[in-house]
Image (cartoon, rainbow, N blue to C red):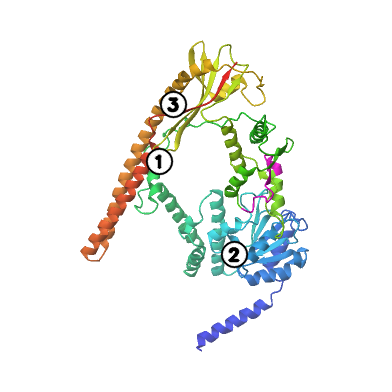
Amino acid sequence: ISGDEQAEVAALEEFAAALREIDAASFSKFQRLVQRLKEPEFNWQAADPSDRLVIFSERIETLRWLRENLPGAAGLKPGHFEILHGGMTDTEQQELVDRFGRQDDSVRVLLCSDVASEGLNLHYFCHRLVHFDLPWSLMVFQQRNGRVDRYGQTRQPRIVYLFTETGVDRIKGDLRILEILQTKDEQANRNLGDPASFLHVFDPDKEAAKVAEIMAAGTSPQQFEATIDAAQASTEQAGTDADADAGGDWLLKLFAQTEQRGDAATAPPPSTDFIREGISLFGDGALSSDYAFARTALQQLCIPTPIASFSHDDASQTITLNAPRDLQERLRVTLPLEVRDEHHRYALCAHKSRMAQAIEQARQAKADEESWPALHYLWQQHPIMDWLSDRVLTAFGRHRAPVIQCPQLIDGEQAFLLMGLIPNRKGQPLLIEWQVAVCNAGAWTLQAFPDFVARTRFKAGTLANRNQGIDTAALQANLPAAVAAMKQHMLALQRRFAADMTARLSGTLADLQHLQGRQIEQLELRLAANQQAEQFKKTRREQRTQHIRKVFDEYRQWVQDTMTTEPQPFIQVLAAAVQ
């Protein structure tokens, strides 16, 4: 061993001896942590099971030391502390996370290594997080904070960073770099930005290694901050300059170019001409429209012969249904196995707070208990609602529509509720219109469906069924004229829509042509720098050129098929109304 190595070993031994002298009482960072936890401003209620704490550290040994020393200092029992680290199996980690999310569990403080910084939900009864050690990666900052500062958090997150202070100038500069990282993390969080844009590294380990290299190179904090600010500025500029690079996400560049065609300050606002707010004929404000529809539909479908046994409760907006055979078969393929009831009995609830309570109760179930909510959310996307809608539609029979008596209509007035639809070449609806063709004294007008509903109070519960037969001959005679009026309306909409789409399609195709040319140019540049034989380069050029053309031709066809409408509208008669 050389003299230099002996000196280094001696220095390390001296350093280790000094570290062994440090106990909990003399460990200033630990004492600052305890002080912070007890400060009235931090207001941590350690005895409150709904006010829990997450502490992150880089090293497992530090976590073990904290578990040994923090309970007594914080006034808690050792059983209130658990450690979550990468040496645990996935099952063990998830079991501990589940325990931390159950209010009746004894865990109050979760001591975590960075294995817990990604993908785990720690926010259910916790909005406080302490960085006992600071990571050397902006991405880890964001990942750690995201355990409690995430969707579903009901309280303002409280996040504490424990910085180390030193009197050594060289080390002081390194620690200042860590402070800059923390500041940039908060900046990225405020601006909804990507922390990776500061260092242009998209891996936490590589990002930490890059920071270590910067420290080892003796970079000053001022130089470091200027460097990452410049890196972020270049990233933002690249995001607005689609021509900066012909490679990368060419779809993103395509639409970025489209945005830059004109002055952003004078560009017209997005068109909302073809957007309509939804309307329901069910519900009265107190009751959900989905619940009112489901209740009414089941009541009507059970006359005269019940299709299923069910009960309903308006106060809780809950429907309990015993699924008939056809619904059982549908649910067998539309619901996961763990959701299906072995007795085919389902409770659907539209009351949001009651549903939230049921979800929370299920989430707090222990591992050996049922962990799925006893209630299903009653909304349009539930398979039972799909089944119910289909049963209502088939109850009328093919090519039939109901005739409804509406006292609010003018004498002699007839109204036809119609839906018009125009698809694109792929059969996807592009234009959908609900209109009411109104015939009064031989004159036809089209009225928007919401306006008709408001004028006639055309809603469930407001129209009495008189149980009287209606002569439909006059309605049948006027039906072709109603459909013709709707068809003319849809064709006019189609012309406006097609004119708008033609301009957009032309611009998109031009952008595609330009981008394809850039791809070919980039290919030629790469081949020119390639030292392979010309024969190999020729083969490569042909293969890549063919691939580029194929990709762009397929995308052009997709764009054209998606943005081009079919020539004829589809008109469906939904109902007719008479006085």
- In the displayed structure, 294 sits above or below 191; it is above
Tag 3: amino acid? Met
263, 425: nearer the viewer: 425
Q: Name the residue under label 2.
A: 115
Q: Mark 3 points at which residue?
A: 490
Q: Nearer the viewer, mark 3 or mark 1?
A: 3
Q: Position of residue 6 (x, y in %)?
A: 54, 86
Quadrant of the rendered structure where residue 174 is? bottom right
- In the displayed structure, 422 sits above or below 187; it is above
- Asked whether 347 falls inside the magenta stretch, the response is yes
- First in sequence: mark 3 or mark 2? 2
- First in sequence: mark 1 or mark 2? 2
Question: SS class of the residue under badge 3?
Answer: helix
- Asked whether 1 falls inside the magenta stretch, the response is no
Question: SS class of the residue under badge 1?
Answer: helix
Tag 2: amino acid? Val
Segment colored magenta: 337-354
* Classed neighbour count for the residue bearing mark 1: other residues with Cα under 10 Å, few (<14), some (14–19), many (≥20): few
User: Position of 9 compared to 73: left or right?
Assistant: left
Q: Which of marks 1 and 2 is in front?
A: 2
Residue plotted at (68% across, 59% down): 98
Give the alpha-carbon distance from disc 3 to disc 2, as whole Å: 57 Å
- First in sequence: mark 3 or mark 1? 1
Q: Name the residue under label 1.
A: 259
